[in-house]
Image: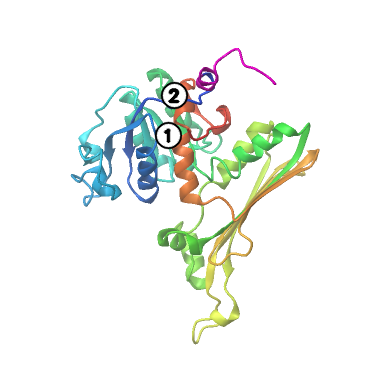
Amino acid sequence: MLSHSVPLSRALESIGGSAPNAAVIHYGLGAIGVEVARLVRDRAGLRSVAAIDINAELIGRSLDEVLGRPGRDAVVQVSSPTGGLRSDPGAVVLHCTTSRLVEAVPQVLGCIRAGFHVISTCEELSYPWEDHLELAREVDDAAKGRGVTVLGTGVNPGFAMDYLPIALSACAQRVAHVRVTRVQDASTRRQSLQRKVGAGLSDAEFKTRVKSGAIGHVGLRESARSLAAAFGWKITRLRTSLRPVHAGASTLRAGSQSQVVRGLRQEIRASVGEHEVIRLTLEISREAQRPRDEVILSGTPNIQMTIPGGLHGDVSTAALVVNTIPRVLQARAGLLAMFDLPPPRPW
């Protein structure tokens, strides 16, 4: 029987297994922000000290009231961003406001200048060094100047289609191709997400909204870029596609020849020269067939992993945001990618 010369509690602490002692600021209290805030309340070592949102209906209310959980956070009131950020230096801002980096950067820079670490669900912040280099440099320089860490994460991008295959590659001697398929049943998700994937629209309506940018998942490019960086591939070609997933013929609208849209299927393929190295396929649709998260690494050896049912988007995103807090507190200053960090986990 093996024995340890170092007490287990000390060993866990040395690798980030103990509960952190962190003040948390909630920036954005939409569906994901509320899910994150509820999880923070249930985690030892975390204390909510401020909350920010632009929704006039939330400003002035207690965080408890917003979360629907009377208790310890009654003293924390929701304020507007214009009220400024005032809290403990070194606090962690959990930023859940937008998918677009150009909108997120002014908010993130305000947090950095106040001396706060930032963990953001902004999809384009998860790996911005290729498509948004100047903004990435601005955030990185500001964070290094204040000695804080900034991370963009979530279930996708941030884990299912990038960090997970990178972690699985630890068992491979060589990786030649990464294929990730993520299928989500939109029927189990909130109505706002169902609208975002076009569920219930006609083909014509779907096409119009795609052109306006109202439909589509943000983050596949970031996942592909992250994988390429991790494996050292210099991408020479990216091909993307977005098309509707249809319901059966029995659900045709009266008097219409167009099928009802159940959701969308997006795909991105990345190549080095003539050789495809990455293929990411995402389907989010009502009553999707065989929901799952599936990773296939072709190489030496071939590796395949499937999560039946798939990772729940909101639940898993909230978990990743909260579970990365200890890792961010221990990380070097600057703008980091998820693969810069050891695997996060609950405590």
Q: Of the two numbered discs 2 and 1 on the same chain, state the one appearing first in sequence.
A: 1
Q: Which residue is mark 2?
A: 329
Q: Which residue is mark 1?
A: 119
Q: Residue 109: in sight, yes or no?
A: no
Magenta extent: 1-13
Residue closer to the observer: 210 or 162: 162
In the orientation shown, which residue stands out farthest toward the right? 300
Say whether residue 10 is magenta.
yes
Q: Splitting the image into 4 quarters, where does residue 6 fall?
A: top right
Task: List x then y, in percent, for residue 49.
Answer: 27, 32
User: Which residue is drawn at the image coordinates 36% and 33% (left, top)?
Assistant: 93
Q: Is residue 179 left or right of residue 114?
A: right
User: Which residue is drawn at the image coordinates 27% and 39% (left, top)?
Assistant: 51
User: Which residue is drawn at the image coordinates 20% and 46% (left, top)?
Assistant: 61
Residue closer to the observer: 30 or 256: 30
Q: Amino acid at mark 2?
A: Leu
From what the image shows, is residue 79 above or below residue 186?
above
In the orientation shown, which residue stands out farthest toward the bottom? 255
